[in-house]
Image: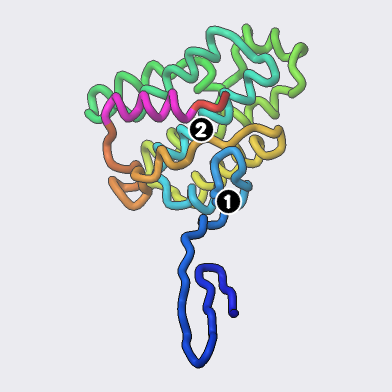
Amino acid sequence: MISTTDKTVFIAAGEIRFFFFLTKPPPSHSITHETMTRDSFLKQARPLSLTARACICLHITEAYFRKIGLSHPLVDEFFNHLWEHPLQAEPKAFSTWEANRGDLVDFGLTDDLPDDLEELMPTLPIDEAQLFSIVEAPVEILWGNFFSTPDEQTSFDYLSFSVDLADREGLIFPKIDLYQASLFADNNGWGKPISQPIRDLWRTDGKIN
C-alpha cells in the first residue's frame, strides 16, 4: 500500500486499485491588514494614486492623534476638510475647497502652529517639530502635487513616513484593499474620480479602530 495526500494505492496480485479520499485543504494563512508587515503594505501601496496615499496617511494620523490624546476642533476641521478632497472634481469647486484649507493645513505647509494647539503641546508626548512631520505627510502628498507635475517618489516617501509611524506605534495598518482601483497610472497621478459613496466607504471602512 502506498499513501499520498489525496489517494491510497493498493497493490495486490498484480492488480493496482486506486481509492481516492476527499481531504480538507490545508489551513489558510492569508495576510490581512491586521497582520501585514510594513514592507508588504508598502509594496501593495506603491501603485496607488496620490488621492489614495493621502487617505491612508489621514487614517494613520487620525489613529495616532487618538492614541496620544490630541483632540481639538482644529484637528476635526483638518480631517474633515482633507476628506473632502476626493470629491473636488470641478475646478471651481476645487478652488473654493482649497481656499478654505484651515489653520492645521497651513501648519503642514510650514506656517506657524495655531495658538490653540500650541497651548496643548505640553500635554502631548511629542514636540512641535514631530507634530509638523506627522501633519506634513498627508498635506504635502496633496498640496505638493496640486500645482506641479505629480511627484511619485516624494509622495511615496511621505506615505512611507506615515506607515513607519504606524509600525513604530503599534497601529494596525489601514485596509489597503479599499484603494486598489485608485492608481497613480490614472488621471495624471490622482486616480480615477470616485463617487461620494466610495469616498464614504474609504473613510469609514478604512478607519483604524
Q: State the residue at coordinates (30%, 25%).
A: 197
**Which region shows up in magenta?**
195-206
The residue nearer to you, when weighing 113 against 83, is 83
Type of amino acid at the residue the image marks with label 1: His
Image quadrant assignment for residue 162:
top right
User: For residue 153, which numbered disc appears in the image?
Assistant: none
Q: Nearer the viewer, mark 1 or mark 2?
A: 1
Q: Does the magenta segment cover residue 203?
A: yes
Residue farthest toward the front in the current orientation of the protein: 13
Q: Position of residue 110 (x, y in %)?
A: 57, 27
Residue topped by disc 2:
138
Crowd rating for badge 2 (residues with CA inside 10 Å; few <14, some 14–19, many 20+): many
The residue nearer to you, when weighing 188 against 29, is 29
User: For residue 29, which numbered disc appears in the image?
Assistant: 1
- Above or below residue 162? Residue 92 is above
Q: State the residue at coordinates (65%, 15%).
A: 70
Type of amino acid at the residue the image marks with label 2: Pro
Q: Position of residue 32 (x, y in %)?
A: 54, 43
Q: State the residue at coordinates (57%, 52%).
A: 27
Considering the whole magenta stretch, tell me its main secondary structure.
helix
Q: Disc 2 on helix, strand or loop? A: helix
- Above or below residue 75? Residue 128 is below
